[in-house]
């Protein structure tokens, strides 16, 4: 029925389809503001600090074994070294525990963003760009019109939903 029309939507400004392209094509042709919405990812540095923590624990354990086995050192020096190494191990364990907690939290945060990312990606692949008029429009709207920059960026934004509440409570505080 209207399969052809939906493949080649008409630009609402010039009423032609010859310069209409997807945002993906427009992005590939060098218009960087039409980049696909970035996928939300967890904080990788947290995992890095966990690895460092595990490394410190291994080195510490190695030194304890070596020190306990070594002879010739005064008893006090050995005791102090063992204590210092133990403190290092405890600090490393605490740090990697905290890092692990933060990594889990970061993962949860990016998981919460996944539906928003899904929506943004859907909008991104649905919207069309007319090169002649340099406008973006939504061909699925009943009467398509050129989208403003604000409308476009909100359609493509990957943000948590409760951000809208922050916008409402900004300058209009002294209302009543
Ligand atoms: Zn046009």
Image (cartoon, rainbow, N blue to C red):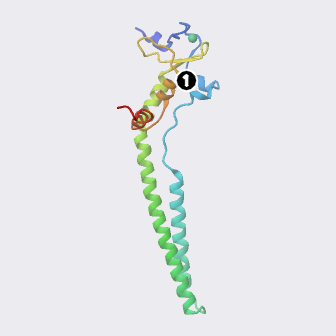
Which residue corresponds to the image point at 52% horizontal and 36% vertical from the top-left? 38
Q: Residue furthest top?
A: 15
Q: Residues within 10 Å of mark 1 (few under 14, many from 20)?
A: many
Q: Residue furthest right?
A: 30
x then y, percent, for residue 23: 55, 23
The N terminus lies in which quarter of the figure?
A: top left
Q: Exactly how many numbered labels are in the figure?
A: 1
Q: Is residue 113 above or below residue 143?
A: below
The image quadrant that residue 32 belongs to is top right
Q: Is residue 118 above or below residue 98?
A: above
Q: For mark 1, what is the residue?
A: 23
The C terminus lies in which quarter of the figure?
A: top left
The image quadrant that residue 101 belongs to is bottom left
Relative placement, left or right, of 44 versus 107 is right
The image quadrant that residue 56 belongs to is bottom right
Ligand 1 picture quarter? top right
Q: Secondary structure at mark 1?
A: helix
Q: Is residue 109 above or below residue 97?
A: above
x then y, percent, for residue 49: 53, 60
Which residue corresponds to the image point at 51% horizontal and 56% vertical from the top-left? 47
Q: Could you say which is closer to the camera, residue 51 or residue 144? A: 144
Disc 1: residue Cβ within 8 A of ligand 1's nearest atom? no
Q: Is residue 149 above or below residue 104?
A: above
Relative placement, left or right, of 107 versus 28 is left
x then y, percent, for residue 94: 46, 67
């Amino acid at each position: 029925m209207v399969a052809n029309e939906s493949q080649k939507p008409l630009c609402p400004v010039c009423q032609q389809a010859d310069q209409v392209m997807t945002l993906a094509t427009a992005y590939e042709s060098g218009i960087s503001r039409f980049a696909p919405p970035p996928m939300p990812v967890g904080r990788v540095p947290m995992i890095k600090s966990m690895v460092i923590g595990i490394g410190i624990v291994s080195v510490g354990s190695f030194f304890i074994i070596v020190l306990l086995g070594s002879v010739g050192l005064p008893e006090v020096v050995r005791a102090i070294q063992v204590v210092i190494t133990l403190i290092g191990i405890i600090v490393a364990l605490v740090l990697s525990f905290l890092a692990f907690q933060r990594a889990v939290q970061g993962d949860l945060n990016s998981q919460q963003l996944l539906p928003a990312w899904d929506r943004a990606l859907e909008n991104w692949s649905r919207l069309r760009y007319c090169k002649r008029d340099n406008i973006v429009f939504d061909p699925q709207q009943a009467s398509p019109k050129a989208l403003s920059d604000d409308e476009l960026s909100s359609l493509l934004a990957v943000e948590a939903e409760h951000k809208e509440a922050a916008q409402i409570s900004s300058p209009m505080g002294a209302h009543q």
